[in-house]
């Protein structure tokens, strides 16, 4: 159960942490490109010190209602950060994008993983991922990021997510993506109610049966707010519980904002798994 990310070989039977690094400019940080580069590198450096195996660099917000970003703007935000982190730090740089041009350029600049919340659904994305030759994470989403939470509906969420992912895997392999290079993600919060998310988490082990390593992201998500009643900035304990459960159920990569704490939580889960 090994997977190769450029230079790095990882044992995917263990759980690894992916730190979230947003390079979307928010309304009140007008620091300019150089400050943003510095800030991104500092943040990534801390994540690596805290035990991150991956840093996920994203330049396009998937938030419903977020402004659309042009291809050039996304390239300008993401590429310098990918290049700098790849050069300066011993970490696998993941590029969180659905844009084929960004996939190709980021991998050329050192990215070791493509993370696409649109499951390589944009025109040219399958081919770009196949040509890039690095592992790719295919995530389930119902609808589009803009409307996904309007009225999520499933007859059987586990079966439908499994079928969606199976179809995307087939298409990716047909486009030339190496089957050994495919990671799957049920897409917590992407077109799902709390009930759907919980059913998926409870059955995560069954998604393992699809035969690909799993990535999960629940850090700070509203599903945890719904369970605990906590605001965004008070969801760390809930996020750690979710990370621990996913690690126990075999997730290979856990995407998280709070790397240091998540690494500890996952170490406990892995120690318990090894004791069986
Ligand atoms: C608004 C909506 C803001 C959603 C941020 C988000 C995942 C991901 C994200 C995930 C993979 C967040 C998400 N979530 N990539 N990117 N899996 N593979 O809460 O669950 O971070 S963005």
Image: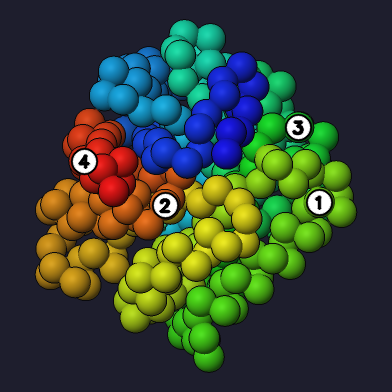
Q: Of marks 3 and 1, which one's residue comes earlier in the chain?
A: 3
Residue 129 in the image, given as x and y percentages of width and height = 75, 41
Which dot, 3 or 2, sits closer to the camera? 2
Which badge, 1 or 4, comes first in the chain's sequence?
1
Task: Give the number of the disc on residue 173.
Answer: 1
Q: Is residue 71 or residue 3 the one in the foreground?
A: 3
User: Residue 88: image x %, image y %?
Assistant: 47, 8
| Residue drawn at 29 percent across, 68 percent down | 223
Residue position for label 4? 268
Mark 4 surroundings: few (<14), some (14-19) or many (≥20) residues within 10 A: some
Q: Give percent across and percent down for residue 12.
A: 51, 39
Quick check: can you spot residue 174? Answer: yes
The residues tagged by marks 2 and 4 sit, at their Cα atoms, a distance apart of: 13 Å
Q: Which residue is mark 2?
A: 250
- Mark 2 surroundings: few (<14), some (14-19) or many (≥20) residues within 10 A: many
Disc on res. 133? 3
Q: Residue furthest bottom?
A: 155
Q: Secondary structure at mark 2?
A: loop
**C-alpha span from label 2 to label 1:** 24 Å
């Amino acid at each position: 159960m090994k997977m190769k990310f450029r230079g790095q070989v990882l044992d995917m039977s263990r759980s690894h942490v992916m730190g979230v690094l947003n390079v979307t400019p928010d309304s009140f940080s007008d620091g300019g490109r150089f400050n943003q580069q510095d800030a991104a590198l500092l943040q990534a450096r801390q994540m690596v010190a805290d035990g991150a195996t991956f840093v996920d660099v994203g330049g396009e917000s998937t938030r419903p209602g977020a402004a659309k970003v042009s291809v050039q703007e996304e390239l300008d935000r993401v590429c310098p950060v990918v290049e700098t982190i790849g050069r300066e730090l011993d970490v696998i740089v993941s590029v969180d994008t659905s844009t084929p041009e960004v996939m190709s350029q980021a991998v050329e600049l050192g990215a070791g993983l493509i993370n696409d919340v649109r499951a390589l659904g944009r025109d040219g994305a399958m081919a770009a991922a196949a040509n890039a030759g690095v592992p790719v994470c295919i995530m389930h989403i119902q609808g589009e990021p803009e409307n996904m939470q309007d009225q999520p509906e499933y007859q059987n969420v586990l079966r439908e997510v499994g079928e969606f992912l199976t179809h995307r895997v087939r298409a990716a392999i047909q486009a030339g993506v190496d089957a050994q290079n495919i990671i799957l993600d049920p897409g917590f919060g992407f077109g799902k109610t709390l009930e759907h998310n919980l059913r998926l988490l409870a059955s995560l082990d069954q998604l393992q049966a699809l035969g690909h390593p799993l990535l999960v992201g629940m850090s700070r998500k509203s599903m945890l707010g719904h369970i605990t009643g906590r605001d965004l900035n008070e969801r760390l304990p809930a996020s750690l519980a979710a990370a621990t459960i996913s690690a126990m159920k075999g997730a290979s990569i856990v995407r998280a904002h709070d790397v240091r704490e998540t690494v500890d939580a996952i170490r406990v889960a892995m120690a318990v798994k090894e004791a069986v």
